[in-house]
Amino acid sequence: MKLITATDHVRLAVYDQNPQSDRTVFFIHGWPLSHEIFEYQTQLLLENGFRVASLDLRGFGCSDAPSFGYCYDQMAQDVHSAVKALGLQRFVLVGFSMGGAIALRYMRLFE
């Protein structure tokens, strides 16, 4: 895990496993979970040579829990901050539950 700083100075926990692979899956969890919800998918993907990236959304897991910034635009910006910090170019974005809505907002704003 590494901590990155979001655009509004919130620290986000970002996870990056098997970073040397050129095939990347980026997971976004739902409310009120953390990156750990994808533990089984992560293991299978790693066994098959994929890079697996994820983050704990603000307020969850090891990320800061500020009293602000819980709108979809900001959470999509948080994902973008993680993508930039990891240097991702081409990747598959997977969102579960609320994470799916964040993935859609991310694609609208940044792709």
Image (spheres, grey):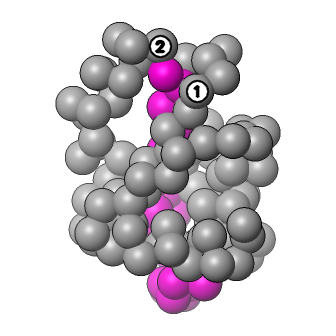
Q: Which amino acid is tagged 2?
A: Gly
Which stretch did the figure color magenta?
50-73
Between 63 and 72, which is closer to the camera in this rendering?
Answer: 72
* Quadrant the C terminus occupies: bottom right
**Is residue 106 at all visible to an observer of this figure?**
yes
**Above or below, comparing residue 55 to residue 52 in the picture:** below
Is the stretch drawn in magenta largely helix, strand or loop? loop
Residue corresponding to mark 1: 23
Q: Whole-Å distance between the Cαs marked 2 and 1? A: 8 Å
Judged from the image, the secondary structure of the residue bearing numbered disc 1 is loop
**Above or below, comparing residue 70 to residue 99 in the picture:** below
Residue 43 in the image: state x and y as whole percent: 30, 22
Residue 106 in the image: state x and y as whole percent: 60, 71
Question: Is mark 2 in CB contact (under 8 Å) with mark 1?
Answer: yes
Mark closer to the chain start, 2 or 1: 1
- Asked if residue 108 lies in the magenta stretch, the reply is no
**Above or below, comparing residue 108 to residue 65 in the picture:** below
Q: Which amino acid is tagged 1?
A: Arg
- Mark 1 is surrounded, within 10 Å at the Cα level, by few (under 14), some (14 to 19) or many (20 or more) other residues, namely some
Tag of residue 49: 2
**Is residue 6 at all visible to an observer of this figure?**
no
